[in-house]
């Protein structure tokens, strides 16, 4: 029997898939990730991903480049690459002068990037939604925040990954597919 979380992910994806089908763009969302791919991602990141994200990855392992309203929904490999870049910058000292950076409120820990953050989507310019597995004192494990490479982290923009998917589904009518390849805001 599926959990409530898994059912919510499947329902949100159902809405998203129907929109992609209606646009003739189902090819822009990728086939499922294998359990092995998800396990390798968790091992490489040193985290246990929430059920909602693993359920989503088992349904669609991301999107084609430019095939998501915010750019690209990251696959297991894409997540690993994106997080790898941010972690390399963090451990390399690039954010040392931003250790005290604090977004509004206490939902996020101080700093420009945290090792407990997992990129979900990316726009190709260093911006995207991030799953926060290491929140601040007023935050919630699994909240989804926004990371902007110029202004820093902010949010949360959704209380969890299911909320993120529902928000994307709710905004799809604001977008159109261009030449069957890219999604662009109307």
Image: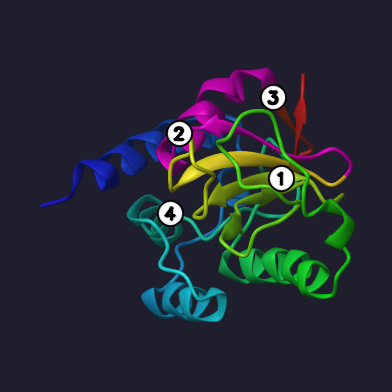
Q: Does residue 33 show up? A: yes
Give residue 128's mark: 1
Mark 1 closeness class: few <14, some 14–19, many ≥20 residues within 10 Å: many
Q: Nearer the viewer, mark 3 or mark 1?
A: 1
Image check: 58 left or right of 148? left
Distance Cα–Cα, label 2 vs label 4? 13 Å
Residues at marks 2 and 3, CA–CA distance in whole angstroms: 24 Å
Q: Nearer the viewer, residue 88 or 7?
A: 88
Task: Assign the C terminus to one quadrant of the image.
Answer: top right
Residue 87 percent location from the top left of the image: 72, 69
Where residue 175 is drawn, which disc sits there? 3
Which badge, 2 or 1, is on the more N-terminal residue? 1
Q: Earlier in the sequence, mark 2 or mark 3?
A: 2
Residue that badge 2 annotates: 159
* Left or right of 83 in this view: 58: left
Q: Earlier along the polypeptide chain: callout 1 or callout 4?
A: 4
The kind of secondary structure element at disc 1 is: strand
Q: Is residue 58 above or below residue 153?
A: below
Alpha carbon separation for disc pair 2 and 1: 16 Å
What residue appears at the point 42 percent right and 62 percent down from the top-left corner?
Answer: 49
Q: Secondary structure at mark 3?
A: strand
Above or below, 74 against 76 in this view is: above
Q: Nearer the viewer, mark 2 or mark 3?
A: 2
Extent of the magenta region: 150-175
Image coordinates for residue 181, horizontal then vertical, percent: 75, 45
For the residues labelled 1 and 4, the Cα–Cα distance comes to 16 Å
Question: Is-magenta flag for residue 167?
Answer: yes
The chosen color scheme is: rainbow
């Amino acid at each position: 029997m599926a959990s409530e979380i898994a059912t919510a992910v499947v329902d949100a994806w159902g809405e998203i898939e129907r929109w992609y089908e209606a646009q003739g763009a189902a090819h822009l969302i990728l086939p499922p990730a294998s359990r092995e791919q998800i396990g390798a991602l968790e091992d490489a990141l040193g985290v246990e991903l929430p059920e909602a994200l693993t359920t989503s990855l088992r349904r669609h392992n991301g999107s084609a480049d430019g095939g998501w309203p915010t750019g690209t929904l990251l696959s297991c490999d894409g997540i690993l690459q994106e997080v790898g870049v941010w972690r390399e910058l963090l451990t390399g000292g690039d954010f040392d002068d931003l250790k005290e950076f604090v977004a509004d409120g206490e939902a996020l820990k101080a700093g420009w990037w945290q090792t407990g953050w997992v990129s979900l989507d990316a726009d190709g310019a260093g911006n995207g939604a991030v799953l926060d597995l290491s929140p601040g004192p007023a935050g919630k494990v699994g909240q989804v925040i926004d990371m902007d490479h110029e202004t820093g982290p902010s949010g949360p923009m959704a209380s969890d990954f299911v909320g993120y998917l529902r928000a994307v589904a709710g905004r799809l009518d604001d977008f159109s597919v261009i030449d069957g390849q890219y999604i662009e805001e109307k």
